[in-house]
Each structure stands twice: as C-alpha cells, then as structure tokens.
Image: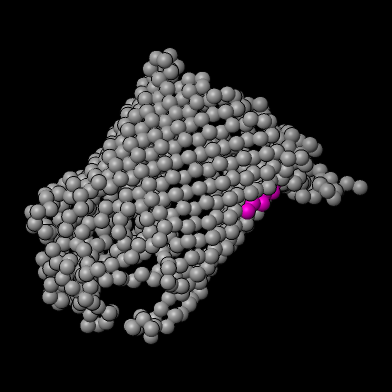
Amino acid sequence: MQQQNILHLSTIAAVLTITTPFTALGDDMIKQMTKPQSTIQFGAGYLSDDNARFGQFSGLRDEGAYGIFNVDILRRNDDSGTWFKIIGRNLGLQNREIRLEHSKQGNWGYSVEFNQTPRYEPFPAITAVEGIGSAQLEVPTIPTTGNPTQLKTERESINVGINKLLPGNFELNLHFRNEEKDGARIFGRGNRLGAPSPTAVGGFEFTPEPINFTTRQFGATLDYTGKDLQVTGGYHGSIFLNKNSALHITGGSDVGGIYAPNNFSPIALPSDNQAHQAFLSGGYSFTPTTRGILKASYTRATQSDSFFPTQFATPGIGSNLGGQVDTALVQSSLSARPLPKLSLLANARFEDRNDNTPVFFYNPIALEPDLNGNRWSGLNQPRSFRTWNSKFEGSYALPMNFRFISGIDYEHWDRTGSPATTGHRSTTDEISYRAELRRTLAETVTGTISYIHSDRFGSHFLTNRTATGDPFFNFIAPINLADRKRDKVRLSVNWEPIDPLSVQVMIDESWDNYGHRAGSDLGTQKGSARNYSIDAVYSFSELWQATGWFSRNETFLDQASLTPSPPRHLQERWTVGLDNISTAFGAGLNGRPTEKSILALILSTVISLINLINQLFRMHKPIRYQISISSSPDLDYLLNMLFKKTMGSG
C-alpha cells in the first residue's frame, strides 16, 4: 500500500499570481538578457542600537534611521551596439560608490568610478590634546581630564579606465586612480627605560597622527590573444604624497631628562615615495596537452623626500634618505599530460629584492649608554633577500577509480643584514615531500588522504652584539627561522547526496619538532595542531545559494626559557605549554532578489524541500504529492509540472 501525502499551499496564493504558461519563463529570461531594464532602489533602514564595530567602515554606528539608495541604469543601442551603464551602491551611506561605463562591444570602452570609504576608531578617545587632525598639537604638561574625541579617516578615490581593441588581436588598456585620505589615527610618543615600575623614567603620551595622504596609481597594458600564444605586457606606477612632513608638538611631560617625552618633537611622518614596474607575462600551448606560462617583472621603489629642516641627525648624512629598492621577479610553470593517465606539473619562482639604500650613522646619541648600560650602532639597516621556490608534481590514474599524486616542494632564502635584538641567520632551506591518494568512493562521494613531511634547516645563527661588541641575548632561535621537522596528515571528503547539495569535510593534524641555537636548549621545543572543518552549499536555483560552515582549530606549543636574574649559573630553566583553541561557524544566503528570481526562489525552495524529503524517504516508501492552490489554476499547473519534472511523480 502506498502512502499518499497531500500538501495544501493555498496560503501562497495571496503572495503569488501567475497568468503566463510555464514556457514563458525562458522567454522572459532571454528578453531580460537582450533588453536590459533599469532599476532605482530607495528606502530607509533603522539601527536599533549603537554598534561601533558594525559600522566601522560604513558609518552605521549610532542608533537611528539611515537612507538607502541604489541605482542600476542600463541602456543598449541596438543600432550601434553600444552600452551605457550607471551603477550606484550605498549612495545614502558613507561607504558609497558609483560607476559609469560606456562601451561598444568588440571595439572600445571607458569607465569612471568614485568610491568613498570611512574608517572609525571603534572607541572614542578621552583626551585634552588640542589640534587633533593637524600637524600642530598641544599636549598638557600634567595629566588633564579631557573630552571624548572620535578619531576617523576617510578615503575618496576616482578611477578612470579606457580600453580599445586594435587590429591583429591586440587590446590596449589604460588606467588611473587618485585617492585622497584625510583624518587622524591613533599614535603616541614617549619612552620607557629600565624595569617596569611606577618610578620608571619616561612615559607615553597620546599624540594622534594627522592623515593627509594622496596616492596616485596609473599604468597601461597591451594584450595579445592568439590561438596558441597569449601575451600581456605593460607598465604600472604609483606615487605617494604626504602633505605633512613632521608632527610638531608643544607641551607634554618633562620627566626623564633627555629621555622625557617632551623632547620628542618634531616627529617625522611617512615620507613621499614612488614605485615603477615593467612587467611581461604570457602563455603558450606547445601541444593540446602541454602548456607553458612565463611571468617577469622589474620594480624600482625610491624615497628621496627631503628631511625637515630641524631633523635630529648626525651631520653629513645628506638631505634625504636616498632609499632605493630594486626587485626582479621571474615565475614559470609547465603542465603536460604525456600519457592519458599521467599528468605532470612543474613550477619555479625567483625573486631578488635588493635594498640599495645607503648606510649612515643617523643617531648621534646611539653610542651613549642608556639606563640599562647598553649602547647601539645608530646605523640604518637595509635588508635584502633572494628567494627560490620550486615544485614538481605528478598525478597518475590507477585502477578502481584511484588516483595517486606525489610532489616535492623546495624553498630557499638568502638574507642580508646584521642581527639586532632578535636572532638572525643568513640562509634557510625547506624541502617537503607530499603523497596523496584520491578515490571516488561512490557516485556522490570522493575521498582524499595525504601525508606531507617537511624539513627546514639553514646556516648558523649570527651573534647579536651591542655597539660595544658585547654579546646580547643569543639564546633563542626565532620560530620562523629555527630548524623544524613537520609531519602532517590530512583527510578530506566531498559528498553530494543530492544534486543541489554539496558538503566538504576536512581533518588534518600536524606535529612539529624544533631545533635550537648552538649551546642552548631554549626557545620553542615542539608543537602540534589539529584542524576540523565542514562546509556546505545548497543551491535553490542559479540565482540563490545558501552556505554554512563550521571550523575548529587546536594549536599547542611547548617552549623553554630562563629566569632573568643574573649571573647565568644562577638562572633557572623553566618550561611552559601554550595552547590556542578556537571554534567558529556561520551561515549565509547569496542571491539576486529580482521580481522573477523571488518567484523562482519560492518555487525552487518548495521543490527542493520536498525533493529532499523524497530523497531521504524514497528507500522506505514512495511518496505521492498533490499541489493545490485554489485561487490560481495556472500556478497549480506550473507547480505540478515542476514537481513532476523534479521527482518523476505527480
């Protein structure tokens, strides 16, 4: 005996009215693609309570009403094939944007765009400092109760783009962007020397940094698109201008002699700088199964902004930093399928970042001992590095729907510079071996298990020294430079129980063992990490998707150190176990709410839910459905046709 379920959907009749046959939906969609419609959206929203974090980048911070205004103006000239678009978003809010586009298909186009983005500090500052937002600040000599002040910056940018198709499969693109950023942000001056205590020399004072920046970006690209060869070459430049070269402060605390906060004025602010890059990239298909890609670029960044007249510095260092950094970058890859079941991939990347900034003795009091008796070099320290990354991977299809993937990854770093207050080594190398087995477990389930072993090693650690040549804190190997052996296992499963639903599950666990500096067993000892995640996507239609995810991360680290009391033979070694555990989850709905898509969403949601019930219970008893909407015979017919098409029953 069959079970019969009758679903009465008469309550939907008050919301939906359909007077067109089922086949008209496709015609309407085609018409919408060829005859675009313009829309204007306006309204009001209300924020029920103050929320500084929620509106940090939109201005929706305070309780109250806000305007909503969006526009989509689309026009197409069928005779000339030209398009005209005006797209505006959040025009009633502070993070507004509007874009104008005018183009002729397959010929030319240009666009102009305006964007405005605020950034509020989450909490107001209670301060008596005056002149905030300017380069002239007044700080009370003694602590003074102030008033609430909201720090804020705002960006306004204008973007212009032009493109033109040229004969011979070429296309020229030009772009320009000008951004103005104004306001004030958190900043402070001061010093604290000696062991922390109520009587420690110095202190810190609140001195907000004035923001008055201009950033210009511009460039051009020339593209070629052929059957086997595609090439892009061009130029990109950027210029940064700061209208304030220094922050001048009057007042402030005079406690601490030469280290007192009121001696730190003026304070240099970010200097003008610029960068220029030439680049070339392309791909070539040698055969239908073999393709190579090459990318190369050269960038020169300079900083030659003059020091301000009263800059505190050693005589003879020149009028500006003379900063110059040259970066060369080359990347290449080759993919091939020499056999039907075998795929190969090789990647290589080389970067040479050369800091050519001259080295000078900038700080004339660096050699004077501080309150802890230390003296420092007073020299600037340019840092250059070279990196080489390469990867080789092979994939082979095995019987019984298995696929085996293996690979080798290699990374090499060369660094310049001398150690200061942290450990430093000139070179490090890391090599990793990967093995992965993938199989289709069922028609809707794919599983993967992989193992990775990596080994990081490098040159000896350089000795940290003070200006007098004495060794300084040479016990610790920084975690990012220390020798390390890592083993990692990962399991992932992709499941599609029904057509619109996909679920991905991933679990991995890793174990680390760290090496130490010569003659020391201090620093990081070992660590481990576990990660679990579940991601799900459900597609109601082509226009609407629901997503959900859950993740958990557990990280553990053991490290060792010494008590600070000298001499060394009296210091005691102690260890600590650190852990960081986090859990996160979320859900979302993505879609385009048009009149047609709302109808499609409601219909497909009903169909999807009943289809899901059908899938879950089909193995037990067949279920029959009858759709009844008394006030709309056409909708009755449409729903039953959709249900019949979806589930094969009526």
Residue for point 54% across, 24% down: 286
Give percent across and percent down for residue 72: 42, 34
How many numbered marks does the figure carry? 0
Q: Inspect the magenta stretch and tell me whether residue 123 lies in it.
A: no
Viewed as shown, does residue 440 lie left or right of 177? right
Q: Residue at x 36, y 81 (%)?
A: 568
User: Where, quadrant-wise, is the C terminus in this rendering?
Assistant: top right
Q: Position of residue 625 (x, y in %)?
A: 78, 43
Q: Is residue 646 above or below residue 77?
A: below
The furthest residue to the right: 1
Residue at (18, 73) in percent of width and height: 369
Say whether residue 447 is magenta: yes
443 w.r.t. 487: above or below: above
- 122 and 17: which is toward the camera: 122
Model colouring:
one colour
Foreground of the two, 266 or 510: 510
Residue 129 seen in this snapshot: no
* Residue 140 found in image quarter: bottom left
Q: Is residue 36 left or right of residue 311?
A: right
Residue 445 horizontal/vertical position (percent):
72, 46
Who is closer to the viewer here, 517 or 201?
517
Q: In the image, residue 600 lies at what x, y percent?
A: 61, 38
Q: Is residue 303 visible?
A: yes
Question: What range of the chain is rendered magenta?
Answer: 446-451
Q: Main secondary structure of the magenta part?
A: strand
Which residue shows up at 38% across the image and 59% down it? 425
Say which quarter of the image contains residue 234: top left
